[in-house]
Image (cartoon, rainbow, N blue to C red):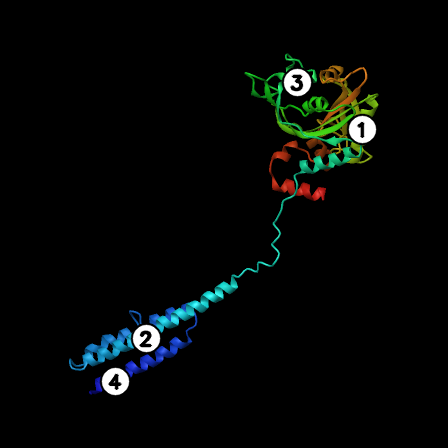
Amino acid sequence: MTNATTTFDTTLADLRDRALAALAVADDPEAMAAWERAYLGAKGELTGLLRGLGALSAAERPGAGRAANAVKQELTAAFAARNEAVASVSLEAQLAADAIDVTLPGRAPILGAEHPVTRMVAELGEIFALMGFQTVYGPEVETGHYNFDLLNIPSDHPARDVWDTMIVQSEREEIVLRTHTSPMQARTMEQTEPPVRVIVPGRAYRYEAQDASHEWMFHQLEGLAVDERITLADLKGVLTELARQLFGPQRKVRFRCDFFPFVEPGVDFAVDCAICGGGGCRVCKQTGWLEMGGAGMVHPRVLRGVGYDPDRYTGFAFGLGIERMIMMKYGVDDVRAFAGNDLRFLRRMARLAA
């Protein structure tokens, strides 16, 4: 054996011992990859040693090559076994870190607040319940029979014109998006014997220009009371009590004569504007008063149309704008904000109502 062969064998044995020692302490995928590059990679120590076989004589090369290949196979097998063990430990650690304790209570979802219209509808329901009224709901897509005919609105009335009403169908039967919640007056009376005391919250639709106090889609609260000996004083008492409950005892109320086909006499109901304190603003159109809606005594023709005897029964009805009540209560100066989906506005309203 020549000195070159002895040096090669010594170097090979030293490389084997160092590689196995380094492999034994490699304990994560990154360390394993670094070990493989250092010893078995294209620029690794063992690869470099094998390239040095050319320095040996032709007689020495076969034996040295076999010895080097044996070390390479040993290191490759050792790497495969160690790599599998390290990968298994790493996987177990990851699974333990990602484990979910299914016995723990779930995380509470982040919920939004109720829309201000929804909250106002609930508040109105509570106020009127204390005055003996029941809350009922009706369809938003109505027939002309209920939306107009039974409310003493004849076929030639301007309110039936397309500029006020959104027509769904007109060929076979007049179908409209209800222009008010008043159709539930007739629907309720057809199904109920007096006494009747109901409120009807819901959406209404009108083809009209939008401004700070008008929307094409809005929410209305219909009210109806029918019994013997009901008078206009009862109506005024109910709406005055509503204003006190909603806006406080300091608010002033106003009733003025007005015309609505389904009531006689008719009045408009207004409250002094809380936004400007009665001084005048764009919401109250500089009048100092904010109209809440229309009201009056149920027309005898409406009572007769649903089978009630107008000589025996009287009643009152009202239709109030729900958004306007919220505007009055919380100082909102533009009705369009309620349908605007501005989260800043909705969060502010939630804080004010809390």
- Of circles 4 and 3, the one toward us is 3
Write down the residue under mark 3. Answer: 148
Please rate how many residues cluster around mark 3, counting C-alpha atoms within 10 Å: few if below 14, some from 14 to 19, many from 20: many
Q: Earlier in the sequence, mark 4 or mark 2?
A: 4
- Of circles 4 and 2, the one toward us is 2
Please rate how many residues cluster around mark 2, counting C-alpha atoms within 10 Å: few if below 14, some from 14 to 19, many from 20: many
Vertical position of residue 292 compared to residue 66: above or below: above
Left/right of residue 350 with respect to residue 173 in the rendered view:
right
Q: Amino acid at mark 3?
A: Phe
Q: Amino acid at mark 1?
A: Val
**Residue 339 in the image: x percent, y percent?**
61, 34
Number of on-image labels:
4
Q: Earlier in the sequence, mark 1 or mark 4?
A: 4
- Of circles 1 and 3, the one toward us is 3
Which mark, residue 238?
Answer: 1
Which residue is more in the foreground, 191 or 116?
191
Which mark, residue 217?
Answer: none
Q: Are marks 1 and 2 in contact (CB under 8 Å)?
A: no
Please rate how many residues cluster around mark 1, counting C-alpha atoms within 10 Å: few if below 14, some from 14 to 19, many from 20: few
Which mark, residue 75?
Answer: 2
The quadrant the N terminus occupies is bottom left
Report, in whole angstroms, how far the alpha carbon at label 4 lies from the one at label 2: 20 Å
The quadrant the C terminus occupies is top right
Please rate how many residues cluster around mark 4, counting C-alpha atoms within 10 Å: few if below 14, some from 14 to 19, many from 20: few
Q: Quadrant of residue 3?
A: bottom left
